Image (cartoon, rainbow, N blue to C red):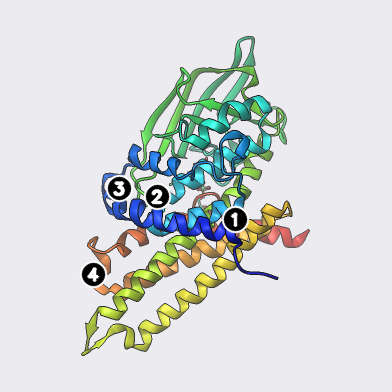
Amino acid sequence: MNFDFDEDHTLLQQQVREFVESEVAPGAAERDSQAAMPKALISKLAEMGLLGITIPEAYGGAGMGTTASSMVVEEVSKGCAGTGVFLSAHQSLCVDPIMTFGSDVQKKRYLPALASGEMIGCLSLTEPGSGSDAGAATCRAELKDDGWHVNGSKIFVTNGKEAGVMVLLAVTDPDEPKHRMSAFIVETDTPGVRLSKLEKKLGIRCSSTAEFVFEGCVIPKDAMIGERGHGMRVALTTLNGGRIGIASQALGIAEACLHEATEYAKTRVQFGRPIGAFQAIQNKLADMRVGIEAARGLVYRAAWLKDLGQDYVRAGAAAKLFASELCSRCANHAVQVFGGYGYCNDYPVERLLRDAKITEVYEGTSEIHRLVIARSLAH
Ligand SMILES: Cc1cc2nc3c(=O)[nH]c(=O)nc-3n(C[C@H](O)[C@H](O)[C@H](O)COP(=O)(O)OP(=O)(O)OC[C@H]3O[C@@H](n4cnc5c(N)ncnc54)[C@H](O)[C@@H]3O)c2cc1C
């Protein structure tokens, strides 16, 4: 057994840490207040090769695996959780399904563009009436002579504002209860695709969250990925992997909370002593450290299983569930350690607390993950 990263991963971690320190962390507060992801930052992420970490070298990527992409999302999320999810959604919700289910033609068309940043990717699964119950989707795709006619709407699309390409889930076979949906690749500048709203959010504000309306949108017959009627398989496989990305984001936020709280506890003096000398504060820091170690083990074990091609579904759900709830606890502790200053936006822990919450909600809520894990025990 070996808990160390190999040389390639250690080098990547070092490079990404330096990049985050100089290019990502310094603008995090500004991006949060502007609720925007600057194009210049996207270009830098692309130049660093972070948009194509898992894309094979033949398509212009780095050809690394889930362990590497988890590490990238963790490190970037330490500096800016919104940028962390920008990368995670691009990678796990769009690149991954195209790599797993796309045809050779689709891979050639999209993977190089996704690796270089020419196109940003997103996933459109959620609808106003179907969130946790993804199978209740109503957005419709009907096959006609000139292609698939798509009509309906999708909400909560991460990267919707920046995306040039989306993986879309739509109902193709309404009378086939188990095979109603299919997955498609849709270019967002296709006539009939309209970004109708951008959400204003509690946290991860620089990450865009968009609503799309499809009206009279026609996409080519060969835009489908995977088999007709197997859209839920594409969606679930995608989300199973995506959870490891969100767990990595949660881990990064939790680490940022511990770092901020520890530094503050060393310097804030009350009753003539640094507050870090008080056992109540030490207990919080110790609990955060232990929780982070546990989350780290779960996250990288899930990534490792995925890289080995082994079953990682329960491991990924466990990592996401544990890391996200730990992340919220750490953010809460960090604000408490800062006292009143933690509640004000002069210090980053206020933003970290707002950013942390979403990790318990998207790509499957904690309630749904408990269901997934419990069901896996019954089989
Ligand atoms: C910022 C943000 C970004 C997102 N990004 C994307 C994206 O890129 N693409 C995309 O397609 N979607 C995205 N989503 C959607 C996200 O995955 C859903 O919000 C999430 O899955 C929950 O669905 P819902 O909001 O409809 O809540 P609901 O499903 O309505 O759930 C409400 C509550 O009921 C609970 N609940 C529901 N069913 C059960 C059950 N069977 N047992 C116990 N409890 C249950 C839930 O856990 C939750 O607490 C995003 C959402 C947000 C807020």
At 32% from the left and 74% from the top, the residue drawn is: 263
Earlier sequence position, callout 3 versus callout 4 = 3
Residue ID for mark 1: 67
Evaluate if marks 3 and 2 touch, with contact meaning CB atoms under 8 Å apart. Answer: yes
Earlier sequence position, callout 1 versus callout 2 = 1
Residue ID for mark 2: 82
Earlier sequence position, callout 3 versus callout 2 = 3
Dot 2: what SS? helix
Answer whether residue 339 is visible to the viewer in this image.
Answer: yes
- Counting from the top left corner in percent of width and height, residue 235 is at 62, 40
Residue ID for mark 3: 31
Residue 301 against residue 293 in the figure, above or below = above
Residue flagged by tag 3: what amino acid is it? Arg
Q: Depth check: 97 or 76 in front?
A: 76
Residue ID for mark 4: 341
Earlier sequence position, callout 4 versus callout 1 = 1
Evaluate if marks 4 and 1 touch, with contact meaning CB atoms under 8 Å apart. Answer: no
